[in-house]
Image (cartoon, rainbow, N blue to C red):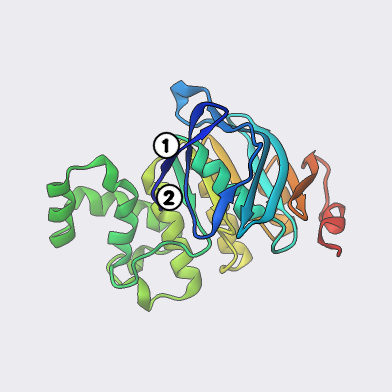
Amino acid sequence: MWGSRSALSIDGEQQVFTPTENFSPLPGGEGVNARYGAFLLAAFELSKAGAAYNGKAALRDISLGIERGERIALVGRSGAGKSTLLRLLYGSGQDDTALLPQDLGLVKTLSVFHNVFMGRLHRNSTWYNLANLVKPFGCEIDSITGILRKLRLDEKLFVPVGELSGGQQQRTAVARALFQGSSAFLGDEPVSAVDEHQAEIMLQSINDSHDTVVLAMHDADLAIRYTDRVIGIKDGRIVMDKSTAGMVASDLNDLYKS
């Protein structure tokens, strides 16, 4: 929940969209709808959707259904449209979704503890959040320490995020998403700054903590191992949608060719 949401009308129905700088949905899209309302964003659906930056199409004619319980990898070259697709999915949904953007959305002057705690600011009263900012409550320290321990970051609990390495900052952002406790997780390159061992721990924690997971990934091997379905994007269009069962990294080579 890192970014404000605004209403958008598509075909007479009000949808939800997360505005980003110089970003706009293309006309003609039939909307993006969350399904299984009782589960609060347990699945996503796009029908003939598109998006553009500064009038130039970034995604075209995207029709995509994601069922509750699926683990999805979005793969393709840089600039193919993976991040844009994640934004459309996130903007379409209800509040029970954790989003991990590439820029992480961390406050560098605050500690790891306070950045992780931000995942649940919306669940508490203003006075509670302010009090916890000044003097962290023991129950919150215990909860966040437990999550950080899984990610091998608990020793950095009260270290300012600006003093951490890139990989440690990425683990902090993942911890924030885990602490948020949402049913769905959307991650834009969530393990790009860590080694393979740390990546495996983080991806397993993400899968264990969410019903539905959608990840934009560059690492084909990790994408295949930690998801059950790969969606390949090339030049703003979906060109592949396959199960990862029996798949090997070389099966994705065509997605990276010019």
Within the image, what quadrant is residue 76 found in?
bottom right
Of residues 171 and 25, which is closer to you in this image?
Answer: 25
- Residue under the point 49% across and 65% down: 103
Q: Nearer the viewer, mark 2 or mark 1?
A: 1
Graded by Cα atoms within 10 Å as few (under 14), some (14 to 19) or many (20 or more), the crowding at tag 2 reads many
Of residues 198 and 121, which is closer to you in this image?
Answer: 121
Can you give x and y, in whole percent of width and height, for residue 130 in the image?
Answer: 15, 55
Within the image, what quadrant is residue 11 found in?
top right
Residue type at tag 1:
Asp
In this rendering, does residue 66 appear at all? yes
Of residues 108 and 50, which is closer to you in this image?
Answer: 50
Q: Which mark is residue 188?
A: none
Tag 2 secondary structure: helix
In this rendering, the count of numbered labels is: 2
- Residue under the point 30% across and 46% down: 120
**Is residue 10 depicted above or below 149 in this figure?**
above
Alpha carbon distance from label 2 to label 1? 11 Å
**Is residue 233 depicted above or below 184 in this figure?**
below
Q: Is residue 234 found left or right of 43 in the rendered image? A: right
Q: Which mark is residue 96?
A: 1
Tag 1 secondary structure: loop
Residue type at tag 2:
Ala
View extreme (bottom): residue = 163
**Is residue 212 depicted above or below 137 in this figure?**
above
Q: Is residue 157 found left or right of 9 in the rendered image? A: left
Which sits earlier in the primary sequence, circle 2 or circle 1? 1
In this rendering, does residue 204 appear at all? no
Can you give x and y, in whole percent of width and height, for residue 55 in the image?
Answer: 64, 56
Q: Is residue 119 found left or right of 31 in the rendered image? A: left
Can you give x and y, in whole percent of width and height, for residue 72 in the image?
Answer: 66, 42
Q: Which residue bears the numbered disc 2?
A: 177
- Residue under the point 31% across and 53% down: 118
